[in-house]
Amino acid sequence: MLLVAPYARGMAVDAATALEFAGTYDPTPGPVPARVVMSQRWTQLTYLHWPYDPAAVAPLLPAGTVPDTFGGVTWIGLIAFWMRDVRVLGSAPVPYLSSFLETNVRAYAVDGEGRRSVVFFSLDASRLLPVAVARASYRIPYIWSSMRLLASGRELTYLTRRRVGPAASRITVRIGAPVTATPLDHFLTARWGLHSRWYGITTYVPIIHEPWPLLSAELLELDDSLVVAAGLPAPSGPPRVLCSPGVRVRLGTPQRLGTPQRLGTPQRLGTPQRLGTTADGR
């Protein structure tokens, strides 16, 4: 089933637009934004994804967006990784502050112009200052948490515990061989924008990154309450699991929904990152 049109709020998203984009997905990177506000490397990344009824996700999305769907369902991701080399407006990375662990809960949306995006419901991070800056600038719901990443051979364990409230997460995976991305994998990983709420206004932030080098993975352990804490129903069934050594990600200037996007030069692909070892973000 495709439940899209009734969920539009604010700027209209018509049924024809939603249907047009529901069955296709172009994973080709777009042009670099005219102004890159922030760049960062996402490394040692694990994706867990579950299918959800769009009706359960739609009320949580910013006005003017609806759930993006694949195969008639939308998807919720629990994504854990190590963020490194954070740079603002081209500045040099600040030691300690530019490297931290993150675990986020995210959805996938599309707006009335057909721009597909991620929407973050929560982002737990292990550094207080980056949390404060992200909340104040992009109005992204970062939360300061105690976090660790443990590596043993091909196994990775991500530990997250919020400093306020009981929400926590423990994920352990065993990394496998490289895989060729399926259309669904492209849908879940090749996202070129971010929708968020900015002081009551829905904004769109253009994002550019290299195609994710994907690895198969086996989920060995999962004990998570972050998804439910984001206001979602508990996931049902086993998740779709993938890992990646990572890529560099660049974010452009936030734009009010309906503002034309200014673009720069075409995307130039870089070298994928290698998996690292142990981190402690407490």
Image (spheres, grey):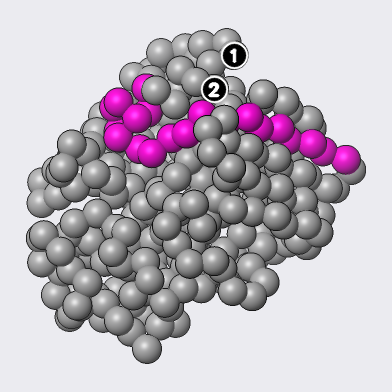
Quadrant in the picture for the C terminus: top right
Question: Which secondary structure lies at badge 2?
Answer: loop
What's the residue type where badge 1 is placed?
Tyr
Q: Pointer 2: residues within 10 angstroms few (<14), some, or many (20+)?
A: many
Furthest-right residue in this view: 153
Q: Is residue 129 left or right of residue 115?
A: right
The spot of residue 169 in percent (x, y) is 65, 47
- The label shown at residue 265 is none
Q: Is residue 70 left or right of residue 161?
A: left
The spot of residue 197 in percent (x, y) is 24, 44
Task: State whether residue 49 appears in this view.
Answer: yes
- The label shown at residue 96 is 1
Part of the protein shown in magenta: 133-152
The spot of residue 156 in percent (x, y) is 78, 45
Q: Is residue 61 magenta?
A: no
The correct choice, above or below, for 208 with respect to 183 in the image is: above
Of the two numbered discs 2 and 1 in the rendering, the one whose residue sits closer to the viewer: 2
The correct choice, above or below, for 79 with respect to 163 in the image is: below
Whichever of callouts 2 and 1 sits on the residue coming sooner in the sequence is 1
Q: Is residue 220 left or right of residue 141?
A: right
Furthest-bottom residue in this view: 1
The spot of residue 261 in percent (x, y) is 17, 45
Question: Which secondary structure lies at badge 1?
Answer: loop
Residue at left offset 30%, top offset 81%: 3
Q: Which residue is mark 2?
A: 127
Q: Pointer 1: residues within 10 angstroms few (<14), some, or many (20+)?
A: few
The answer to the question of whether label 2 and label 1 lie on touching residues, with beta carbons closer than 8 A, is yes
Residue 152 or residue 85, whichever sits in front = 152
Q: Is residue 199 left or right of residue 185?
A: left
The correct choice, above or below, for 248 with respect to 73 in the image is: above
Residue at left offset 39%, top offset 61%: 108
